[in-house]
Image (cartoon, rainbow, N blue to C red):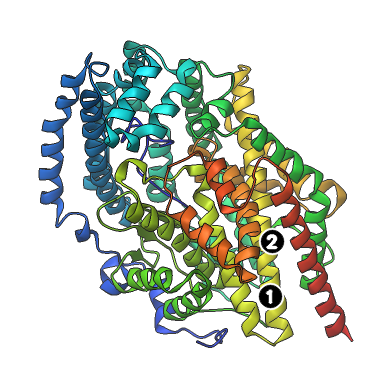
């Protein structure tokens, strides 16, 4: 997941602003993955935040310096149309302040994510959030004032002052959004609302990561395990079916006990989106979210429509999974089980790094050398520990330093794939930060998942070429299909749920935990063919939406699916040895926000306004299933 602290509060001009597999023994790294005391994890497996600030005191001094400088924004008020130099001075100042604010917030956020229970870092995040709101409020006059300047005059300014060329795209975008920009007073009110805007997400994050009473279950071997944010993903994939059933029932059953709390949190998030939609005069929350990057809403609706039209292809995969698992009836709790019980793919972190470096070679020596540097110089926080934020992300917001990656590594193939995924984000940020000035370095969110899913495609291609064993090949082909399931179908399932609850709120309908349970239950049963007996969605799965933090990211999830189809098209060209395609892809990674995302992808060789990329993904999915069925038929003989 791409995770950036660069947003509208940071920058008013932001656009969203080895062996192939090991035996099942406990290696030292496996033991580290089970070590939950952060102090006992060797430093080499923890990120080094001193690259950002030497210590908390240095952060404090930088914060105080920024607070003292923010009022300087007001000296440009009512002067932007007087000369090109005044306009340039204002834009440069706001950009510089935004860069430092982003750095401050990244340090506080990354520090907090190490252990969300530590109140000091939570307090630092709150400080920065408030400073960011004040910064945005003082800068609120800028866009309305620019819109008040004759556009021919703005173009003349750019022509006479070459340094303004850096801001041409941002200035053009301000004009594009003129109908949704208020007066200076209205923009200040909207900016001040930022003080409350991150409330639902923050409350959800603390509750889910630090305070939620995660259940424990006793497995068939007598071992009692805790199903927390890192434990549940690990134990839902147990080979013993009764254990998986018990894990799902306990985990989602406990979530459902708190449906009123989770429902209130998500309802608050949707209401926040409604406020900004109304404040900026958009017809819908979806239109408001997508317009930030100039994405037509048809892209979203077409994705949902295309996925629904191709559910038979998805159901074919589910039936194939049922056949391989050898179960009479597939259940939702079977979806994460290893396809082949006798193939247990495990990798130490060092083995994963070796495979990934080999897989990324088609992108060139320079690309690989930077990845090696990231491994060597502690850009990555590897293992799960108590209180640590769940999941994985890459944060590329510290422009003058380097990106950081958070992992919760458990030694599975999925964990290795996650590293490749996050390194895609990291290299996208690194190349954009290296090749672009700060003002155009933050790439649009719509393209954020292209580089990450591209790296996953390179990894699976490399791994398949290394193996001869049919069982292992079958397992990895299944893993590729799992990627499509999780990235195209599952994320679109989430996107449909997110769209539905926003549409309900826009109509004034209630959004309680029970209502959201019903909506989610209906959608997930449709996707998994419950009524067709393709995959039985047991009752507790209705609570799964509470486990998904992405619903607090304002229509983010659909981009996983669109990006996957885009990267599938590009990776096919790169893996075929097309040097021009590789060059265009690296240029795409280096482009930051120099253009709108749809245009950036067109330059990389893929047109997301057509159904072509999606159709190619479905074609490849069916081809992989054909290959798996051939292997199965051969093994049967």
Q: Is residue 541 above or below residue 416?
A: above
Q: Residue at x 29, y 50 (%)?
A: 399
Q: CA distance from mark 1 to mark 2?
A: 14 Å
Quadrant including the C terminus:
bottom right
Q: Secondary structure at mark 2?
A: loop
Question: Residue 245 in the image: x percent, y percent?
Answer: 67, 61
| Total numbered badges shown on the rendered structure | 2
Residue 138 tag number = none
Q: Secondary structure at mark 1?
A: helix
Q: Residue at x 42, y 74 (%)?
A: 365
When asked about the image quadrant of residue 430, the answer is bottom left
Q: Residue at x 54, y 88 (%)?
A: 19
Give the residue at mark 1: 475
Question: Residue 231 in the image: x percent, y percent?
Answer: 49, 62
Residue 626 located left or right of residue 590: right
> Which of 574 and 520 lies nearest the eye of the viewer?
574
Question: Residue 126 in the image: x percent, y percent?
Answer: 26, 37
When asked about the image quadrant of residue 519, the answer is top right
Whether residue 472 is visible:
yes
Whether residue 117 is visible:
no
């Amino acid at each position: 997941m791409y995770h950036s602290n660069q947003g509208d509060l940071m920058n008013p001009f932001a656009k969203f602003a080895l062996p192939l597999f090991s035996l099942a023994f406990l290696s030292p790294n496996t033991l580290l993955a089970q070590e939950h005391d952060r102090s006992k994890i060797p430093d080499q497996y923890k990120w080094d935040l001193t690259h950002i600030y030497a210590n908390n005191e240095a952060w404090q001094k930088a914060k105080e310096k920024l607070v003292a400088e923010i009022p300087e924004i007001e000296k440009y008020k009512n002067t932007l149309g007087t000369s090109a130099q005044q306009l340039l001075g204002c834009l440069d100042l706001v950009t510089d302040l935004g860069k430092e604010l982003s750095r401050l917030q990244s340090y506080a956020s990354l520090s907090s994510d190490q252990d969300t229970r530590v109140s000091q870092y939570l307090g630092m995040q709150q400080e920065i959030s408030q400073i960011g709101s004040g910064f945005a409020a003082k800068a609120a006059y800028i866009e309305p004032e620019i819109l008040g300047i004759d556009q021919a005059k703005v173009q003349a300014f750019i022509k006479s002052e070459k340094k303004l060329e850096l801001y041409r795209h941002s200035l053009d975008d301000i004009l594009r959004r003129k109908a949704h920009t208020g007066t200076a007073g209205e923009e200040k009110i909207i900016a001040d609302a930022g003080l409350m805007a991150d409330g639902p997400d923050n409350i959800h994050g603390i509750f889910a990561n630090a305070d939620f009473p995660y259940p424990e279950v006793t497995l068939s071997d007598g071992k009692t395990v805790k199903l927390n944010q890192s434990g549940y993903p690990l134990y839902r994939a147990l080979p013993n079916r009764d254990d998986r059933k018990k894990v799902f029932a306990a985990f989602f059953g406990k979530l459902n006990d708190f449906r009123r709390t989770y429902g209130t949190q998500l309802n608050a998030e949707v209401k926040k989106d409604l406020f900004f939609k109304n404040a900026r005069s958009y017809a819908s929350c979806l239109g408001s979210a997508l317009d930030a990057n100039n994405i037509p809403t048809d892209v979203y609706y077409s994705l949902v429509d295309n996925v629904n039209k191709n559910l038979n292809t998805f159901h074919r995969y589910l039936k194939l999974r049922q056949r391989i698992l050898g179960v009479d009836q597939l259940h939702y709790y079977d979806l994460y089980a290893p396809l082949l019980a006798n193939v247990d793919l495990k990798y130490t972190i060092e083995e994963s790094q070796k495979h990934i470096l080999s897989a990324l070679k088609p992108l060139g020596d320079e690309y690989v050398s930077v990845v090696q540097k990231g491994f060597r110089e502690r850009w990555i926080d590897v293992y799960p520990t108590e209180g640590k934020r769940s999941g994985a992300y890459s944060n590329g917001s510290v422009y003058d330093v380097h990106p950081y990656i958070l992992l919760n590594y458990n030694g599975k193939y999925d964990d290795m794939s996650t590293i490749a995924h996050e390194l895609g984000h990291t290299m996208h940020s690194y190349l954009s930060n290296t090749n672009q000035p700060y003002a155009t370095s933050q790439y649009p969110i719509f393209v954020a998942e292209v580089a990450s899913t591209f790296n996953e495609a390179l990894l699976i291609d490399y791994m398949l070429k290394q193996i001869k064993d049919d069982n292992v090949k079958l397992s990895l082909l299944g893993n590729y299909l799992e990627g499509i399931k999780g990235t195209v179908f599952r994320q679109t399932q989430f996107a449909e749920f997110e769209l539905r609850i926003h549409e309900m709120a826009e109509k004034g309908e209630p959004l309680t935990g029970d209502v959201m349970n019903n909506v989610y239950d209906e959608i997930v049963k449709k996707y998994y063919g419950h009524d067709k007996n393709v995959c039985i969605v047991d009752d507790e799965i209705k609570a799964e939406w509470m486990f998904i933090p992405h619903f607090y990211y304002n229509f983010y999830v659909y981009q996983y699916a669109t990006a996957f189809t885009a990267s599938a098209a590009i990776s096919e060209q790169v893996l075929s040895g097309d040097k021009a395609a590789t060059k265009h892809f690296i240029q795409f990674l280096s482009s930051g926000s120099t253009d709108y995302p749809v245009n950036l992808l067109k330059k990389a060789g893929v047109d997301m306004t057509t159904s072509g990329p999606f159709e190619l993904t479905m074609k490849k999915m069916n081809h992989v299933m054909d290959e798996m069925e051939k292997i199965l038929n051969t093994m049967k003989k």
